[in-house]
């Protein structure tokens, strides 16, 4: 009969169809589970990546957070790390200060940190060890500070969470803010670095400081360059400073205005110090006296600038020990901030001082002093000063600093350069010519 066979055919066909359906639905299921699996894997990877970069117990994050910031913030959560922070910033004398020194691995920062520590203050350093100049010199300064029990936290000034963490651990009495993008001429090459450090970094610091309880007093580095095209001589604090000749100068001038604002709104005690071309041992390799020494020793030619009208360029070169005395004097006479937790309670101290040497010396004279100290003749190219931010001369009137904290520079350029050269040849392991010739004679 056809029916059973039909039935059997139909049954086979149905079975076959249902088999095909099952196979297809299994395939569909497998494909969709694979898809779901892959999507979840991708989401998990993205979440893990995001979480790793952004998690920090203290953090309320912003979209601009950099991985560097969070790495440093992570670093700042260990018990050992907190112990080092506390230990370094604890004063060892009665009524000693507890000072946060920003730019502690820098030239002025390292000298000030040592001087403060030696007299019994607690000093905690902060530095980002950037590559503006040879970081190995900064590491060597760090090593020196470490041998005097000074700990430097390695972080950027713009790391607000880390700064807040430091202030939550230590009730700092003072901040000596020296971290900055320095150099007048480099501002044409990398303008943004000046904005990032000297303006954004300064504001980040002040935002944290204003919210701190107690609020510390701030002493910070401005610059002689704020006088810009000023024609008064010598430069006094009351002279015009609204004609900066470089972006560096403009950012330092902006810093002075920012200091005024935080003093006015939050009662922060603010003292700005206008440094005049600071030089000395452990100095900055980007400065003329430093690279002239290097070039002289390597028999390389140096460019000696003269003004557009063929006059000598001059600077009020100031020796590092005098600057340190000025910084310490400013810290000692800084009054307390009047606010707390971001609220002003009354008017607070607002000061600006010149810290110079009061006797300008021409760059030509600087070179001849180095020639005599190194017993070498410089190959000089005397050229017109490029129009890239330099000013023809600087000369400080320091009577304000003298009246308020007895600032009196006592090192002339020859004496200071002698000390610098002595350090330079020893640090870089160079046999001075004068010595090696004596040595040759002895051997003959
Ligand atoms: O007081 C400041 O606030 C600034 O001081 C410093 O700036 P400056 O006074 O310009 O020092 P520096 O570069 O050593 O040039 C010294 C002299 O050499 C001349 N100079 C320079 C280079 C060159 O190749 N030839 C030359 O003649 C040049 O024309 C100048 O006359 C700091 O770097 C700066 O960060 C800031 O702190």
Image (cartoon, grey):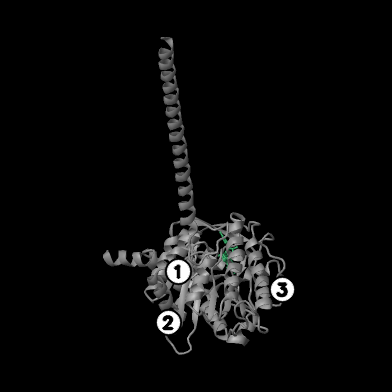
Nearer the observer: mark 1 or 2; the answer is: 1
Tell me whether the residue at label 3 lies in contact with that at label 2, contact meaning CB atoms closer than 8 angstroms. no
**Residue at the limit of the structure toward the left, as seen here:** 443
Helix, strand or loop status at disc 2:
helix
At which x and y percent is residue 427? 39, 66
Tell me whether the residue at label 1 lies in contact with that at label 3, contact meaning CB atoms closer than 8 angstroms. no
At which x and y percent is residue 24? 45, 28
- Residue under label 3: 232
Between discs 3 and 2, the one toward the N terminus: 2
Q: CA distance from mark 1 to mark 2?
A: 19 Å
User: Mark 3: few, some, or many residues within 10 Å (few <14, many ≥20)?
Assistant: few
Between discs 1 and 2, the one toward the N terminus: 2
Quadrant housing the N terminus:
top left
- Examine the rendered structure and indicate whether residue 269 appears above or below residue 292: below
Question: 30 left or right of 273?
Answer: left
Q: Residue at x 69, y 74 (%)?
A: 233
Question: 304 left or right of 30?
Answer: right
- Residue under label 2: 118
In this orientation, which residue lies closer to the viewer: 398 or 363?
398
Helix, strand or loop status at disc 1:
strand
Dot label at residue 431: none
In this orientation, which residue lies closer to the viewer: 39 or 180?
39
Whether the residue carrying mark 1 lies under 8 Å from ligand 1 is answered with no
Between discs 1 and 3, the one toward the N terminus: 1
Q: CA distance from mark 1 to mark 3?
A: 42 Å
At which x and y percent is residue 401? 61, 83
- Residue under label 1: 153
Q: Residue at x 44, y 65 (%)?
A: 138
Helix, strand or loop status at disc 3:
loop
Q: How many marks?
A: 3
Residue 240 lies in quadrant: bottom right
């Amino acid at each position: 009969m056809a029916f059973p066979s039909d039935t059997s055919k139909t049954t086979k066909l149905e079975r076959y169809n249902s088999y095909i359906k099952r196979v297809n639905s299994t395939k569909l299921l497998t494909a969709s589970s694979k898809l779901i699996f892959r999507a979840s894997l991708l989401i998990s990877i993205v979440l893990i990546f995001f979480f790793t970069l952004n998690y920090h117990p203290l953090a309320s994050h912003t979209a601009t957070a950099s991985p560097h910031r969070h790495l440093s913030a992570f670093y700042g959560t260990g018990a050992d790390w907190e112990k080092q922070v506390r230990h370094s910033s604890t004063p060892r004398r009665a009524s000693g200060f507890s000072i946060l020194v920003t730019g502690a691995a820098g030239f002025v920062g390292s000298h000030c940190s040592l001087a403060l520590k030696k007299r019994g203050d607690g000093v905690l350093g902060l530095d980002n060890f950037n590559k503006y100049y040879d970081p190995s010199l900064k590491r060597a300064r760090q090593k020196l500070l470490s041998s005097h029990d000074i700990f430097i936290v390695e972080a950027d000034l713009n790391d607000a969470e880390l700064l807040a963490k430091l202030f939550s651990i230590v009730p700092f009495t003072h901040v000596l803010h020296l971290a900055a993008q320095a150099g007048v001429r480099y501002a044409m090459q990398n303008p943004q670095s000046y904005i990032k450090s000297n303006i954004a970094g300064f504001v980040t610091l002040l935002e944290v400081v204003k919210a701190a309880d107690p609020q510390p007093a701030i002493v910070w580095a401005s610059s002689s360059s704020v006088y810009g095209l000023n024609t008064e001589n010598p430069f006094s604090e009351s002279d015009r400073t609204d004609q900066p000749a470089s972006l560096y100068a403009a950012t330092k001038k902006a810093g002075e205005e920012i200091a005024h604002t935080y003093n006015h709104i939050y009662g922060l005690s603010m003292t700005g110090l206008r440094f005049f071309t600071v030089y000395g041992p452990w100095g900055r390799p980007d400065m003329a006296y430093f690279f002239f020494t290097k070039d002289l020793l390597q028999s390389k030619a140096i460019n000696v600038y003269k003004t557009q009208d063929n006059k000598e360029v001059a600077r009020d070169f100031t020796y590092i020990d005098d600057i340190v005395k000025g910084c310490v004097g400013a810290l000692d006479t800084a009054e307390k901030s009047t606010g707390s937790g971001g609220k002003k309670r009354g008017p607070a101290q607002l000061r600006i001082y010149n810290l110079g040497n009061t006797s300008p010396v021409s760059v030509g004279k600087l070179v001849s002093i180095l020639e005599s100290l190194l017993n070498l003749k410089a190959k000089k190219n005397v050229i017109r000063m490029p129009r890239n931010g330099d000013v023809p001369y600087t000369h400080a009137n320091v009577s304000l600093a003298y009246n308020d904290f007895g600032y009196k520079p006592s090192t002339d350029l020859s004496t200071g350069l002698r000390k610098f050269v002595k350090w330079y040849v020893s640090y870089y392991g160079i046999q001075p010519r004068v010595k090696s010739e004596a040595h040759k004679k002895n051997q003959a």
